[in-house]
Image (cartoon, grey):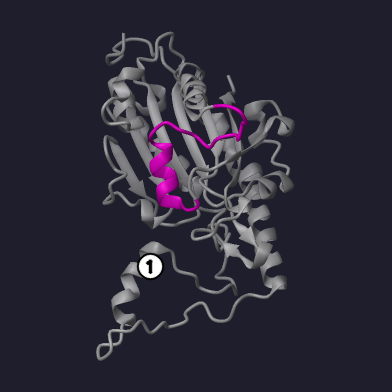
Amino acid sequence: MFGLFKNKRTNNHLFVITLDSCRFDSFMAAEPENIAKLCGGLHNVEKRYSYAGWTAPSHYNLLTGLVPHSSPTEVYASEYYKHDLYKFKDRLGVDEAGFEAMIPHLWLPSYMKAMGYENHALVSLPVLNPATGINRDFDTFKLMPKHNDMLAMLDDIENHKTRESKGLTGNTPQFYLMNVGETHYPYGLPDEDKNDLPHISGVNGIFRKLDNQINEDTGDLVSDNESGDWMDMEMIDKCRQRQIDTVKYLDKVVFPRFYDMLPKDTWVIVTADHGELFGEAGYFGHGPIMHEKCFEVPFLEGKLK
């Protein structure tokens, strides 16, 4: 029975958390033992691969139900997808997952609504803002005021108790997508002073400024070179350490509170939408880069209670 639950909740709550840009080895270097309680310890954290190299397409893919993948050999993609998607029986805590409800939309939030869920998104990056196409079949969708404040997301989740559904404390199962920005460039904490790293615009910022960077007479692009000269390796190494430090912060300060607020029968996925380059092969960042470090991400999931 997949309708609205008028009595005791029978399905798991489901959280999908993306640590934006957090590559696998940065996550592991932080030794996030609190986060890893989810999967029984750091030794169970998997190295997987994102389906895309930057935020927007990776999240669109994630919301088709396909989480970051392993890379098995001598296996047809169709067989891998079957086993990957079958995991939703455990994630939702159901005997019958009703996978046909994914047709024709191929959209996880639509499927979750058919399963009786209330859907929420809390995102940090403007390319995922609620005016974009990703905001479909969500009951609430919020671009956070700060791009690096997961603690504020937890406040919002607590405030959902005032909804008719009572949020996590009610009998309607809840689905949350949380896009966490602390691990994204410039790898800063919520109250941290502006640092000395170059200003590097994302796609959202590029669109906002691009018209003003076209020569009216020739139609040529005239870059404002807002980012300045290419960073030297000392600065790039500093960036990598900053990303590691943000994972340490999330592990020590944010995730203990998050885990404490979760009721019984809540399934959590923690991963990243893509990786990051820190000087390897002359690259920095992510996006138009074909390098394994742009796709290597941590993956862990499970129930705490």
Depth order, front residue of 300/294: 294
Q: Residue at position x 33%, y 68% from top? A: 207
Residue type at mark 1 is: Gly
Q: Is residue 226 magenta?
A: no
Q: Is residue 231 left or right of residue 103?
A: right
Tell me the element at label 1. Answer: helix
166 vs 193, left or right, is left
Q: Nearer the viewer, residue 191 or 273?
A: 273
Residue shown at the point (46%, 45%) measured from the top left:
179
For the image, the number of numbered tags is 1
Residue 298 appears in which quarter of the rendering? top right
Question: With 247 as the anchor, is 29 left or right in this view?
Answer: right
Q: Quadrant of the N terminus?
A: top left
Asked if 135 appears above or below 300 in the picture, the reply is: below
Please indicate, yes or no, whether residue 279 appears anywhere in the rendered image: no
- On whether residue 58 falls in the magenta region, the answer is yes
Q: Main secondary structure of the magenta part?
A: loop
Magenta-drawn segment: 53-75
Say which residue label 1 marks: 205
Q: Is residue 56 above or below residue 302?
A: below
Quarter of the picture containing the C terminus is top right
